[in-house]
Amino acid sequence: MPVSSIDADGQRLRELVLLRRVRDRIDREYAEPLDVEALARGVNMSAGHLSRRFRAAYGESPYSYLMTRRIERAMALLRRGDLSVTEVCFDVGCSSLGTFSTRFTELVGVSPSVYRRQAGGGPEGMPSCVSKQVTRPVRNREARRDGPRLA
């Protein structure tokens, strides 16, 4: 294998490690005020480069991934039923109730208040790890639609 090919493979692996660090940081700090610029600074990349490489590796932008994490956590808090939608919005790191509600509806298919009413305490007797998987929001604005799909 030519030396340049080995160097390129090493560079790709280093970049994947950095992208994984970004994804892990989002998973840990989803409730913090994160933005793409801050995430990029943390791994010494430009925001544009990070966004392009993150999308290539994970199929969505860092911001979309962050919002999905926040919505997943919001779903769990809303199922608990002891917090208002506004409290949940701010607890998961969103600063705008409008943006939160819009993104929640895009990913889940119903508004946060409707979800809270319908969920009413979550699936009874189901372990939380299973409940999380079953109720996970769909990414990339592809909320499930009831009814046939048209070609």
Image (cartoon, grey):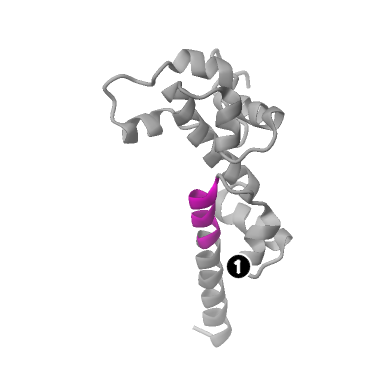
Question: The magenta stretch spans which residues?
Answer: 21-30
**Magenta span includes 127:** no
Measured from the top left, where is residue 60 in percent x and y? Answer: 61, 46
Question: Label 1 sits on what residue type?
Answer: Val
Res. 133 image quadrant: top left
* Residue under pointer 1: 43
Secondary element at image label 1: loop
Residue drawn at x 52%, y 32% is: 74
Residue drawn at x 58%, y 45% is: 66
- Magenta region, main secondary structure: helix
Measured from the top left, where is residue 107 in percent x and y? Answer: 58, 29
Measured from the top left, where is residue 67 in percent x and y? Answer: 60, 40
Which of the two residues, 21 or 140, is positioned nearer the viewer here? 21
Say above or below: 54 vs 151. Answer: below
Say above or below: 84 vs 132. Answer: above
Which of the two residues, 103 or 77, is positioned nearer the viewer here? 77
Residue drawn at x 55%, y 79% is: 5
